[in-house]
Amino acid sequence: MTTLAECEARDAADPLARIRQRFALPDGVIYLDGNSLGALPRAAASHLARVVEAEWGEGLVRSWNTAGWYDAPRRVGAKIARLIGAHDDEVLVADSTSVNLYKLLRAVLSADSARHTILTEPGNFPTDLHIAQGIAAVDPRVRVQLAPREAIADAAGPGTIVLLTHVHYRTCDKYDMAAVNRAVKARGGIVVWDLSHSVGAVALDLAADGAELAVGCGYKYLSGGPGAPAFLYVARHLQARLHSPVTGWLGHAAPFAFADDYVAAPGIDRFQSGTPPILGLAALECGVDLMLETDMALLAAKGQALCDLFIEQVDARCPGLELVTPRDRRVRGSHVSYRHPHAYAVMQALIARGVIGDFREPAVIRFGFAPLYTGFADAWRAVEALAQVLATQAWDDPRFAERARVT
């Protein structure tokens, strides 16, 4: 079994270790929840202060032009495109993941009257299911169909939009994106991917994998901050055919002509709607810039090595936990989940010991490994704390009984 000394040696030799110091991580805390909210890039605080004090405070409205505010959704989108294997003009930062998902689903439904079914899996991330159900509730021609993941491709057809989360939020199961895209396309369907638990954690190449539509959030592995704006991806060949259902003024072909009638902008810009959140974009750009300083293949490999180490240590030291995440790194993302009958209280006991993971209903604890700032010694020490919680039944403490609201 791997020792702490060996983990410390791996950290010392890690080419990504230099980037860890560029995040503001509290002393005495092992942070394993970057899959829910990424750590703060140190540059973000000073950058936001400059945006607020100089660009907003002094530049005022002029900063839309002089400070590049107007171009920020496309500029940051082009940077994210480099992380996911897309062209610069295929990614736009805008709104939230939920709103972007609504835009893409409605756009595809409107572009082809023969499409009438949103096909997804039970247990998909709730907001994805809720957005699909909301569309069906107001459009009688649309229905939501559920199928288990192993039957998704076979259930697709010419009238189908397949809605899938690339890495499952609870189990960390990862789809073979290329295989799913091929199979669904062969049956006449189209896939919309949710990359929220993938981008910044696993290697992505949307173009090579034949992906056509995707959304993703900015506050998890990209470290864009709480409530960071999200992004959407539309492959070039679809952009002229799809129209956003949220026809705001910045999606107009000539927004500053202030015309009464809407004319969609060319390309990805038509998926803009309202005024972009400049402070959120500024924070997100800091996280994305850090991500771009490394090689995504190297980063993804480290994430999988951290997961392997964590699973090895739990196997040896933590009886009573049921692994929910695949052992095979080829079919998983960058977090590890376990089932325990007292899962919530176990996690609260861990947090009290300085190890921050999270809990998901009904009885799952998750540990996220953000490779830019999580080390091998972090993973080893986290399991040591977990073993102590289990051995002492520390969950049986009234302080940990009441469930707090978590995101």
Image: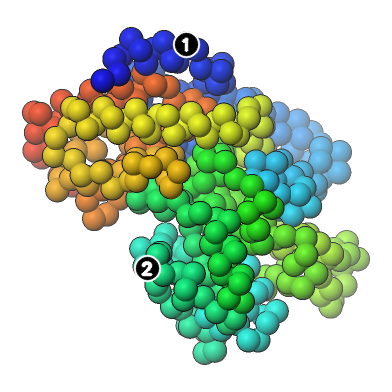
- Locate residue 325, reporting x and y percent: 33, 46
Can you identify the residue that label 2 sits on?
148
Above or below residue 153? Residue 340 is above
At 38% from the left and 42% from the top, the residue drawn is: 328
Mark seen at residue 114:
none
Can you identify the residue that label 1 sits on?
12
- Locate residue 369, reporting x and y percent: 42, 33
Q: Is residue 104 visible?
A: yes
- What type is the residue that disc 2 sits on? Pro
- What type is the residue that disc 1 sits on? Ala
Q: Secondary structure at mark 1?
A: helix
At 49% from the left and 69% from the top, the residue drawn is: 153
| Left or right position of 114 against 34 | right
Q: Residues within 10 Å of mark 1 (few under 14, many from 20)?
A: some
> Farthest residue toward the right?
257
Q: Secondary structure at mark 2?
A: loop
Of 135 and 8, nearer the camera is 8
- Locate residue 338, reporting x and y percent: 26, 43
- Locate residue 394, reporting x and y percent: 12, 32
| Left or right position of 398 against 133 | left
Quarter where residue 213 is shown = bottom right
Above or below residue 188? Residue 11 is above
Above or below residue 394? Residue 138 is below
At 65% from the left and 58% from the top, the residue drawn is: 210
